[in-house]
Image (tube, grey):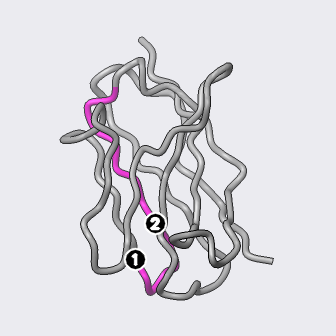
Amino acid sequence: QVQLVESGGGLVQPGGSLRLSCEVSETLPDLYEMGWYRQVPGEIRTSVAVIRRGGRPYYLDSVKGRFLISRDNAKNTVYLQMNNLKPEDTAVYYCNADSPGGVLPSYWGEGIQVTVSS
């Protein structure tokens, strides 16, 4: 069973930075896209950033210019560098591995809390 394990969350002041990491337990086929989602209570889970092999990353409009998604294939790890954090970025962040059209199984991490508050 493929496992995704997030780390790097926590409490940070507005304007601060955090780097989330998502370690995947095994190498996935190249078809997989890796993404970060976030969810606050009472709202749907929203895509924040997605990285595809050989393609341009996707970013939620509200995080463009502040967040950067990257991957280290040798370490089976995906990162989300979050800069200039705002209180509205507070959420549980989830790592996801998915394939276009859902032709392969989708995998989720358990989520990690990010709180931006003074």
Q: Position of residue 85 (x, y in %)?
A: 33, 29
Does residue 112 show up magenta in the picture?
no
- Asked whether the beta carbons under mark 2 and mark 1 sit within 8 Å of each other, the answer is yes
Residue 8 against residue 35 in the figure, above or below: above
Quarter of the N terminus within the rendering: bottom right
Depth check: give the residue in front, 5 or 12. Answer: 5
In front of the other: 79 or 118: 79
> Residue 44, how many percent across, how many down?
61, 31
Local secondary structure at mark 1: strand
Q: Which mark is residue 103?
A: none
Q: Amino acid at mark 1?
A: Asp
- Dot 2, crowdedness within 10 Å: few (<14), some or many (≥20)? many
Give the residue type that dot 2 points to. Val
The residue at 42%/20% (across/down) is: 88
The residue where tag 2 is placed is 78
> Mark 2: which secondary structure?
strand
Mark carried by residue 72: 1
Give the total number of marks visible in the rendering. 2
Extreme residue toward the right, this view: 1
Hey, which residue is sitting farthest top in the picture?
118
Q: CA distance from mark 2 to mark 1?
A: 6 Å
Q: Quadrant of residue 82?
A: top left
Please provide the residue range marked out in magenta: 72-85
User: At 57% from the left edge and 67% from the top edge, which residue is drawn?
Assistant: 98
Q: Residue at x 68, y 65 (%)?
A: 107
